[in-house]
Image (cartoon, rainbow, N blue to C red):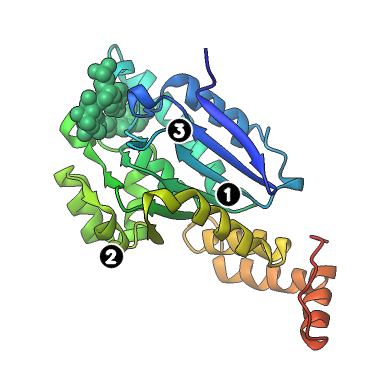
Amino acid sequence: MTDQIQQAVSNHILTLTINRPKALNALNTAIMDRLQILFVDKEIDVTSLKGVIITGSGEKAFIAGADIKEFTGLDASIASTLSRKGHQIFRAIECFPIPVIAAINGFALGGGCELAMACHLRIASDTARFGLPEVSLGLIPGYAGTQRLPTLVGKGRALEMILSGKMIDARTALSFGLVNKVVPQDDLLVKATEWVMEISGNGPLAIQQAIQAIDAAYDQQIDGPEFEMEAFGHLTNTQDFKEGVTAFVEKRKPSFEGK
Ligand code: DAK
């Protein structure tokens, strides 16, 4: 069987392509298991990477949801266990120490939209469409869609999208704040790559701490301002900070080593 998640590294960027185009890249058990190994079990070695791009195979879909054909025979106990597993995987993506960008090349529905929302940043092709249609199946989002969507688009729009189950186009998603950028389909991966490269010109330890500090603002278990103050202090002890300041004074580009 061909890999249902293709992995390729170029320019120190790992691209993960969900590869089930005939099923519009729907998330089946094998794909979820693989994502778990990559992100939860930390198979991805971040030391040599600048970022991760997640995209879908083909031109039609990013991910058209969880694999509906695997739903038959689900009972409450199995469903809760699977939901917990999905939460854990998507949370690991959200907390990943290097930028993870969703390059959304088509339908991002249900679990696909939820995966995109777990990524740090979202760039969409102008053909992309977004929706959380779970209610049309008699369900609610099960991979934290009810939790992440309001943080991105606000409670009112989250209710509108989830209660209607309707799709929105890329421009609307941009105006809602669901995606950061919209680009022509043909440019999607080039633009996503350029974005990672641009970010990676900054201090890697600062990037890592910024991801965590922003996340702390939404985590009720963490004192966000306290986290920021500690992280800020910690970063002033790094070689990267000294290099950043020295490079500014010397009017040159900094060369960060992540130390
Ligand atoms: N699962 C399985 N197969 C799918 C699929 C999906 N989500 N989406 C599409 N496909 C398959 C179709 O069945 C079809 O396969 P064949 O019939 O050719 O074998 C093939 O992909 C092409 O799809 P269409 O022929 O339908 O293509 P169209 O252009 O006509 O329509 C579409 C495109 C995206 C509008 C349509 O395919 C569609 O409505 N797809 C379903 C979208 C959807 O409702 N997705 C599920 C959202 S709910 C859970 C946790 C999370 C979730 C559930 C449980 N637990 C923890 C238990 C999440 C749920 C969701 O994601």
Helix, strand or loop under label 1: loop
Q: Residue at x 75, y 70 (%)?
A: 235
Q: Is 228 positioned to the left or the right of 32 in the image?
A: right
Residue 121, image x and y in percent?
A: 48, 56
Q: Which residue is mark 3?
A: 86
- The type of residue carrying mark 2 is Ser
Q: Alpha carbon of mark 2 to alpha carbon of mark 1: how far?
A: 25 Å
Quarter residue 58 falls in: top left
Q: Is residue 100 above or below residue 183?
A: above
Mark positioned earlier in the residue sequence (2 or 1): 1
Mark positioned earlier in the residue sequence (1 or 3): 3
Mark 1 Cα shell of 10 Å, populated few (<14), some (14-19), many (≥20): some
Q: Is 100 positioned to the left or the right of 44 in the image?
A: left
Residue 27, image x and y in percent?
A: 40, 27
Residue 155, image x and y in percent?
A: 26, 59
Residue 80 in view (yes/no):
yes
Q: Is residue 221 above or below residue 52?
A: below
Q: In the image shown, does 196 or 88 lie closer to the viewer?
A: 196
Q: In the image shown, does 141 or 125 lie closer to the viewer?
A: 125
Single out the mark in the foreground, 2 or 1. 2
The C terminus, quarter of image: bottom right
Q: Which mark is residue 175?
A: 2
Ligand 1 lies in quarter: top left
